[in-house]
Amino acid sequence: MFDNLKIVFHQGKQFIPDVTTAKVPGIYRGRPIISGVQVNEAELQGLCPANAIATKPVSIDLGKCTFCGECALRFPEKITFTTDYKISTNERERLIIKEGDEKPVEVNPETVRREIHQVFGRSLKLRQVSAGGDNSCEWELNAAINVQFDMGRFGIEFVASPRHADGIVITGPITENMAEPLRIAYDAVPDPKIIVLVGTDAISGGLFADSPAIDRGFLDQYPVDLYIPGNPAHPLTIINGLLDLTRKKELIRLIHPV
Amino acid sequence: MNYIRITNHQTIPVSDIPELDYKSFFELNTGFIIDHPERHCVNYFGYHEDNHIKLICCIADDETHEIYVSSCCTAIQSKLQAFTSKLLCFEKFEREIHENFGLDFIDHPWLKPVRYAFNRADKTKTIANYPFFKIEGEELHEVGVGPIHAGVIEPGHFRFICNGEQILHLEIQLGYQHRGIESLFLKKKSILERATLAENIAGDTVVGHTSAFSYLWESLCGYQASRDMHFSRILALEMERMAIHTGDLSAVCTDIAYQLGSSVYGRLRTPLINFMQEWGGNRLSKGLIRPGRDQFPFTSGLAERIKNIFDAFEPDFNEISDELLKLPSVLSRLERTGVVTPADVQEIGAVGMTARMAGINRDIRTSHPYSLYPELNHEPILKHHGDVYSRVLIRRQEVNQSMAYVRDLLNQLPEQTTTNTELGKPKANSFTLSMIEGWRGEICHCAITNEKGDLVLYKIKDPSFHNWLALALSVRNNEISDFPICNKSFNLSYSGHDL
């Protein structure tokens, strides 16, 4: 008993007080900025292993980017990755960062379905389905609920049964072998429900987009409510995205006024 | 000689691999392993060559530090005597060959699909109609779990046959994660594309798989990695081992409802993976390791950071571990739960931690040493009971061991000599085998090139390929409620298996 109390005491305070303003350490690769410098655009485009770079003008699609950072290493004058981890949005086209774009990637409150705030504004329970994910995004989703990131404090939690859930979180490019179980899980979630895609693989298929072993038909049938990019997505990207979607940040500002 | 001896990371001409008729191939490779506990099969695969199928078998010998490679050509519709009829450790390799090429193996106990690959020979077999083993009886019932599990984990289906609360048999059906990675290795041509693919084989073993790919590719191109590259890779590999073991200890604590352990181990993992981000920009080390390059040179500033992180990590880690391993309520859940006997481990050819927990000394860092491991004088940690407790102890001690290795490495920071040159074209008509001891165990990548130096085969074997069967054996005669801790104590990879 006393040993356990001693251990608790030794941990100190571990939680991140304000997850909306926390800084990530080191050289994190978050939202990129593309300068107007002239470079060999064909070479830059050919370099990208995920076909995320388009030219004229140069743009990076964060829904395809694997955040390997190779473009920034080879063309440092053209592309820099900032430590801004808030890159979740509800609009697919907002993930495309164009030359000279420096504005943050955000959830557009105008286009979020109305019932999301009304119904899930206070509590959001999610069923996670890994459909070919390599266990990195699953890892970071688990990290988002640990004692440090502690997403549970905002009333956002993962549940075991889709019947208890308000939506599903998909990771992975959706393999052919997982297509059917994914659809069954989604059908089991009561209405209204949301779909969240976490990670590059889920958003665009990523490196596996042209693999014959995947089947992304599911996403053609249902609307996606939130895109959380990354390979894997950082816990802070995940939490901030979900908070924006459910408009919980207004509540946080009451506790932590800027 | 009817086989060739090679060492880890060595490239040889494909034509140097002797080609045998099936009967001699069978006798040679089964003969290697029968009565030789120091040998096991690290890879056995087939590929299309002209109008037949070529089989290549690689047997590692831990005493001579060599790998014995032999091959055999067979017609597409062949019926062959199964290696498995003599040795169970070939079971999954033969199932994979059967699934991909339709070769029939006589006297194989269960030629069931492995992962329902998109390019399998028989498309009428689908993942929805897997032929599960059945036992009929009024006392028995079946429990099906998955493919979607209660937690945030990867998909796979577990079918238990139980007598009341007791598990008689568990069959594990995988394949849900199959993304066709091996085919993509051939389709995607640039080194960077292939390196990022290697990173995505299993997101929890990024360093392991990417190093295996990098060493393989450098060997194929005739490139010698410099000391600073070796340094970065080994350091990252040992950091990965520490981070995952710490996280898995947290998961074991969660499953026995020891909340304090779960929280403390969970939070202790964070500084380790955050360090990887400080160094290479990604918490799981994606983007850190590339063939022929030292992407993020290791600086003395980073060395200071690690030392500080370890100084804070070590007392807290030891404190919670000591507490965990003396609590009677914890020990009663861990001891004698999920036992796999040394004989079973040997028979199924388990590798890595799963072999070492049952007293079998199988560790690529000593048996097929590479890079800086000879300098570290690595001594594998062995346990002998084969239960959850042994696996927990191994993880605890390997964290301390890896920490000591990292500190050792930091005493001698290498000079930055890597020039980051582009590697040339791989050698034509070559075969390379690359093994790395990841935190789960031996990762083996093999590649074969054609006369133009293009890849014709890329074969990946994650340690989970061998070890899933150990999990299935471990739960026999246990209560079904103990399945979660058995599972977490192994923590095997679904995506690494399904590819």
Image (cartoon, helix red, strand yellow):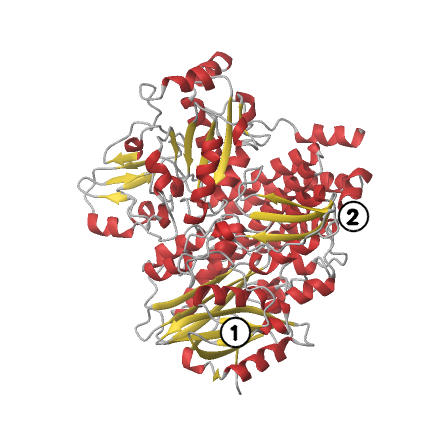
- Residue A93, percent from left and from top: 28, 32
Up the image or down, B237 lies above or below B15; here it is above
Mark 1: which secondary structure?
strand
Q: Is residue A83 left or right of residue A37?
A: right
Up the image or down, A149 lies above or below B297; here it is above
Query: Mark 2 or mark 1, which has the lower sequence index?
Result: 1
- Residue B415 appears in view: no
Find the residue positioned furthest to the front: B138
Residue plotted at (71% across, 44% down): B482
- Residue A195, percent from left and from top: 41, 31
Quadrant in the picture for residue B443: bottom right
Give the amino acid at mark 1: Cys
User: Callout 1: 10 Å neighbours few (<14), some, many (20+)?
Assistant: many
Q: Chain of mark 1?
A: B
Which disc number belongs to residue B335?
A: 2
Q: Which residue is mark 1?
A: B57
Give the amino acid at mark 2: Glu
Q: Are marks 2 and 1 on the same chain?
A: yes
Up the image or down, B22 lies above or below B151; here it is below
How many angstroms separate mark 2 from mark 1 (CA)? 38 Å
Q: Chain of mark 2?
A: B
- Residue B197, percent from left and from top: 40, 54
Up the image or down, B49 lies above or below B177; here it is below
Find the residue positioned furthest to the top: A254
User: Of A64 and B235, which appears nearest the observer?
Assistant: A64
Residue plotted at (42% across, 61% down): B120
- Residue B217 appears in view: yes
